[in-house]
Image (tube, rainbow, N blue to C red):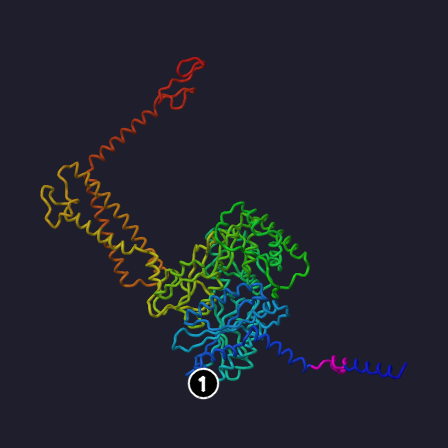
Amino acid sequence: MKPENGGLLLVVILIISGLQAVATPASDTTGPSPTLKAPQIKQTEQKTENACYRSFERLLEAYTAINPTASQPGDQGPKLEFLVATVPDPIDSQMGWHFDLQLDAIQRAIEGSGYVVDRYSLPWSCVSMEAIRGNSAHRLYEDSPGVVIFRSKGENDPRLLALFLVGETPTSGIHKRAFESAMNSIKNVWMNEKRPTDAPARQVRLLGPTFSGSVKSLKAVIDAWWKEHASKDRSAAFRIISGSASNTKNKEELERAVDGASFVRFEATVIPDNVLIERLVDYLNDLGVDHHKVAVLTESNTGYGSGLEQDLSCVSPKPDSTHSTRVCGAGCWLSIPFPMHISKTRSAYEKSLPLKDQYNELLGRAGDQDRVALPLSLDESGNPRDVLPALASTTPLYDELVLSSTLSTISRSGFRYVGLLATDTKDKLFLARQVRKYCPDVRLFTLESDILYSHPTYSYFMEGTIVVSTYSLFNKNQVWSLTSAGRQKRLQFPNNGAQGVYNATLALLDRKAEMIEYATPFKRYDAASVTRPSVWISTVGRDGLWPLRFYGGYVDRGYVVEGMTSSGSRTGEAMSRRMHLGFAPFLLVLLSIYSLACCFGYLRVFRHPPDEQLPQDLRALDMFRPRHSARRQRSQNRHLLVFFLALTLLYTWLGTLFLIPRAYDLKAGSQIHVWEQLYIAGMIYSALVLALTTLAVSLKVASSEKRFIRLLLLKGARVRRALKRLSVGRKRSKRELPFASFLRIPPVKKGKTAWGKSR
C-alpha cells in the first residue's frame, strides 16, 4: 500500500469516528440519567396542559386579566366560593354517558342560583385530542380535576363560583390525586384570606359520590387530606350531599370519626334503597302478590349490588306493628346475580343483528316507530376500567347461555314478578328484552326512574314495569309538590339521579326552597316548614312514566336531607291545589248562591194563593207559585222535584270534589285555615237548606199523587193475581210444547203436526 493511500485511509477512518461520536452521546455504566428525562416529561405535560387543559390557577389568572378589579385584595375583589363534585368518569366508567346528564343538572342548579358560566377546562378532552393526533394520550384526568368558573349575573355582584369535577367509577372509586389537587387549590386560596383566630371551621361543599361503591375511596382520601392539612387546627369540615348514592350504610361509613374528631356530615337527596323496597313490598301486598313467586336479577360486582343483597334479605311480606316490613333473615324473594360481563354480552348482541330488524321481527308492527326519536344502541363504547375485561371471544357466548338458562328456569318455576336491579340503565333494558323473550307473562319492577324506559325501541319490553323511585319524572308533580309559591318554571329531568344531583346542588348552595318535587303532594305546609320527598310507585307507558301511588311517611335515620318551604309565602301547595281543582271552587260559590235563592224563593211563595198575583219584587219567582187546576199543580210539583233533585246532585258532586283534598290534609295532620273553615261552613249550610227544600217538594208530590199511587198499587195487585191464575192452569201433557197453553197451541200428536196436517 502506498503511503499516501494509507494516509488517506486514516483520514477517512478518523472522519467516520468523529461523526459517530457526534451522533451518539456518551454513556456511562450507571445507565440513563434521570435528571435528563425529568425535564422532558415535565415539558411534555406542560405542552399538553397548554394545548387542551388549563388548571384552576390559570383560569383564575385569565379571568383577573380580563377583569382588573377581580385581582384587588380584600373586600374590593370578588368573593370566591367553591364546590367539588364527583361525577361518572366519561372514559374509565361504563356509566360515563351519565357525565353529561349530571353536569347539565349541576349547571342548571348553579345558574338558577344567580350564576352563569364564564370559562372551563376539562382534562377528559385531552384524551380525544391526543388520540386524533396519533399520540399516546396522557391520563391527565387522573391527576387533575375539571374546572368550571361561574360568575354572578348581577353587574355589581363580584361573586365567583369555582366548580371542581373529579371522576369516579362504581368499583375503583374516585380519582384520588385529582381530588387532592382540587382540595389543595381551595386551601391555597383560603390561606391568602384573613380570618379571625376564633372563626369557625371552613366548610368544604362536596357533591357526591355518584355511586355507593365510591364511598370507601372517598372516605380514605378525605381522611388523608384532613390529617395532613386540617387536623391540628380543625380549620375545615366537609358537608357532603349525594344526589344518587342510595345505600343506607354510606352515612355511617363517611361520618365515622377519625382520631376522635367528627368533621364529615353526609346526607342525600334520594331515598335509600331499603325504604324503596319496603314500600314496594307494601304495594305488592295490596295487589295480593305471593312473595315466593318473586325473583330479582341483581349485579354482584359493585357496592350497589352488595348493598341490595342485604336489603333484599331483610324483606318480610307480612308486616307487623313491631318490625314494619324489615325482618332480617325473613326475605323470601329469589335473588339471582346476572353475569358479570353482561355489558359485553349486550354489545355482542347488538352487533349480531341490527336493532331495527330485531324490533320489527319481535313486534311485527311499526306503531312506535312513527314517534320521532333517535335510535338507541346498547353497544358498549370505549374500554372502561371499572370491570375486568373479557379476554376470550367466547365469554359473551357463555354469558348469553347462562342468562337464557336462568330465565328459562324462572319461567318454568312459575315466577310472576321479576325485578331488574342494576346500576346501568342499559343493562336493565337488555335484561328486560331477554325476560320478555323467555318469560312473556311476568311483570317487571325496578328501582330508580329513567325516561329511557319509554324509548320507542324498548317501550314494548318495558311497558307495564313497576318503577319505585324518589322522583317520578312526571312533570305535573312539580305543581303538586311545590315548596315555594310563585314558581313558574318547570324542568324535565332525564333520570332519577339527575334530579337528585340538581336538588343536592341547590341544598349545598343554601337554596333548599327551590328544590323540585321535594315535598309530599297536595300537603299543606306553613312558612319555613321542613319537607322531604315521597316514595313514588309509577308504571312505564308508551310515552313516559305514569304515577300510581306515593308514600309520604318513612324512616330514613337521617339519610335524606331536609328541605324547606319558602318563608315569603305560607305554602306553595295551596296554589297547586287551586290549579288542580280549576274552576270548581268559584263554580261552587255561584251554585250555592243560586241554590239558596231558589230554596228561599220556593219557601216564600209556595203557600201563596193561586188567584192573587205576586208583588212586583217577587215576579221572578212565578215558577214556584201554585197553579189553579189540580192537574197543572201536579205537573208543576213533578217538575220542581226533578229540578231540585238535579240541583242537589250537582251541588253534592262539586262539594265532594272540593272536600276530598281537605280530607287528605286532615289525614296528613295539616290544619285547615280560617277562610277554608268559613267556606266549608257555608257549603254545609247551603247543602242543608237545599236538602230540606227537596224533601218538602217530595212530600208535596207524594200528597198530591196519592190517588195515582193507589191506582198503581191496585193495578199491580190485579196483575199479580192474573199471573198466578196463569201459573196454576191445567197441566200440560208430556208432548206439549213449552208455553203451548199460553200461546193456545194444541199438543203435537203422532203422525200429525200441531195444525192438524199430515207430516
Residue at x 46%, y 75% (from the top left corner): 161
Name the amino acid, label 1: Arg
Q: Is residue 199 left or right of residue 397?
A: left
**Which x, y percent locates residue 568?**
33, 70
Foreground residue, 611 or 370? 370
**Which x, y percent locates residue 152?**
42, 74
**Which x, y percent locates residue 719?**
29, 29
The magenta stretch is 19-33
**Which x, y percent locates residue 393?**
68, 57
Foreground residue, 19 or 511? 19
Please name the residue that numbered disc 1 is placed on. Answer: 195
Q: Is residue 598 left or right of residue 202?
A: left
Q: Residues within 10 Å of mark 1 (few under 14, many from 20)?
A: few
Q: Is residue 135 magenta?
A: no
Q: Is residue 28 magenta?
A: yes
Residue at x 41%, y 21% (from the top left corner): 737
Q: Is residue 508 left or right of residue 715?
A: right
Please tell me in which quadrant of the rendered image residue 35 appears.
Answer: bottom right
Q: Is residue 732 left or right of residue 314?
A: left
